[in-house]
Amino acid sequence: MAEQPAIILVRPQLGENIGKAARAMLNFGLTEMRLVAPRDGWPNPSAGPAAAGADIVLDQAKVFGTVAEAVADCTHIYATTVRKRGVTKPVVGPDEAGRQIHAEPGKSAILFGREASGLETEDVALARTIITVPINPEFGSLNLAQAVILCAYEWSKHADLVQPTEEELLPPAPQEELDGLIAHLEVMLEPKGYFLPEARADATRKTLRTVLTKPAWNHLEVRTLRGVLSSLQRDARR
């Protein structure tokens, strides 16, 4: 697997947003955070609660004075921005950036600007590629954690993360329980004349059994249906 990219937050303003970005990173297997001149210094007591357990990211975060220092060891630098800011560079989406990072040898970094105004032109100038997304031109502002999670998710699609499995399904109910359900329903339908005329009774019973056996009910579902029938029986007796 390719080396994971460094997530570089450039002049972040709020500790809460740094924490939320760390949480977004760890959700998708990224742990290397670099901070460039965080406004309120580092460490920031507001970051921990917002990280919701992503302490490994915050504990290992490194602080740099400039973007140039933060990317000095990186060979592939991506800048996230809605606007090109007058800089002519290749522009890709987070999905293509994720593929490229996995395909390229060497260290990659993704730059994210501060909350109020994003990356400055000189920050973008250090990057080789711009990452942007189609977005509502009337409201094109993503918060910091949203921007991080978009890129982290697309990167993770090419990593060896384990897809969460669905809750394991219960096995189908044993035939004895299913027969009990069918018999219960037949007892209730018999006095209602459901199986009349007599000449069609066998065919009607077979059709009813076919309908009830198709879903492959598990034992909890069969018990639930039996409970429904018992309730209906009680109401009828009253």
Image (spheres, rainbow, N blue to C red):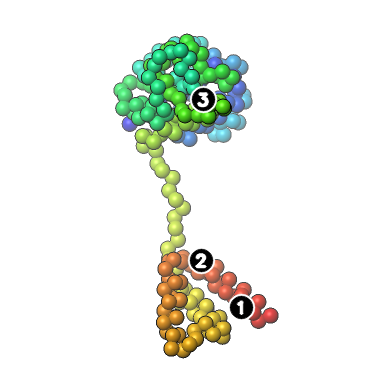
Lateral position of residue 14 relative to residue 22, left or right: right
Query: N-terminal of the two: label 2 or label 1?
Result: 2
For label 2, the residue is 221
Q: Amino acid at mark 3?
A: Asp
- Look at the image and tell me whether residue 117 can be seen: yes
Residue 225 lies, in percent from the top left, at 54, 70
Most distant residue in the front direction: 138
Image quadrant occupied by the N terminus = top left
In the displayed structure, 231 sits above or below 127; it is: below
Q: Which residue is mark 1?
A: 233
**Residue closest to the eye, 104 or 86:** 86
43 with respect to 30 (left or right):
right
What number is the disc on residue 173? none
Q: Amino acid at mark 1?
A: Gln
Q: Position of residue 191 (x, y in %)?
A: 56, 85
- What amino acid type is highlighted by mark number 2? Glu
Residue 201 is situated, as x and y percent measured from the top left of the image, at 45, 85
- Residue at x-position 46% and y-position 65%: 218
Instruction: Identify residue for label 3.
Output: 59
